[in-house]
Image (tube, helix red, strand yellow):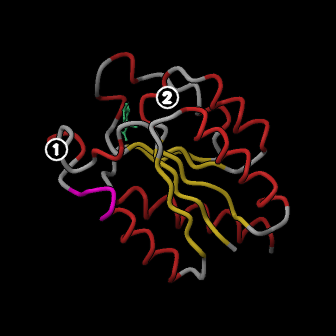
Amino acid sequence: PSITVMNGPNLNLLGTRKPEVYGHTTLSDVEDLVRADAEKLGLELRFLQSNHEGQLIDWIHETGPAFKAGESIGMVYNPGAHTHYSYAIRDAIEGAQVPVIELHISNVHAREEFRHHSVISPVARGIIVGFGVVGYSLAVRGLYELHEAEVS
Ligand code: DQA
């Protein structure tokens, strides 16, 4: 089976954007990190990033049937700022019935007020917040464990 790790707007700038908040690791380093994790768990990795809401929605829709067919165990998703206002992305996750682990590199609750609320959390299977890029590994492992518990 496969796992999708998807990143939303501005995460292509990881490593250079506000390193005091998001660290110096680049998105390509994150890809290497989760590729190693996925390999250890026997999962094929689909690693995606887009700055475009419609593209992200299309990828969520694609993951739905793959999950239903047992070809995908779901998605680890950092929605970036879409987290705080995109009802379209929330509806896509709900409609596609894909298990999604919502992930934030920073502790959004310790930051500006507008980052405290997530419209995605009610449709997420689990949430990882504030562990830096290590959170991606934790989320991959967590989704894998949830999947194992559910199929066994
Ligand atoms: C983020 C937090 C969001 O508030 C922000 O807009 C991002 C990144 C994080 O990973 O901490 O783009 O999702």
In this rendering, position of residue 39 left or right of residue 32: right
> x, y percentage for residue 112?
30, 20
Quadrant occupied by the N terminus: bottom right
Q: Which type of secondary structure does the marked residue at label 1 adopt?
A: helix
The quarter of the rendering in which ligand 1 is drawn is top left
**Residue 90 position (above or below residue 25):** above
Main SS category, magenta section: helix
Q: Residue furthest top?
A: 113
Q: Which residues fall within the magenta stretch?
A: 25-29
Q: Residue furthest left?
A: 20
In this rendering, position of residue 37 left or right of residue 61: left
Q: CA distance from mark 1 to mark 2?
A: 20 Å
> x, y percentage for residue 105?
35, 46
Residue that numbered label 2 is attached to: 82
Tell me the crowding category of disc 1: few under 14, some 14 to 19, or many 20 or more residues within 10 angstroms, Cα based. few
**Residue 63 position (above or below residue 149):** above
- Frontmost residue, 32 versus 54: 54
Q: Residue at x 59, y 33 (%)?
A: 121
Q: Residue at x 56, y 62 (%)?
A: 142
Answer yes or no: disc 2 within 8 Å of ligand 1. yes
Q: The residue under label 2 is which amino acid type?
A: His
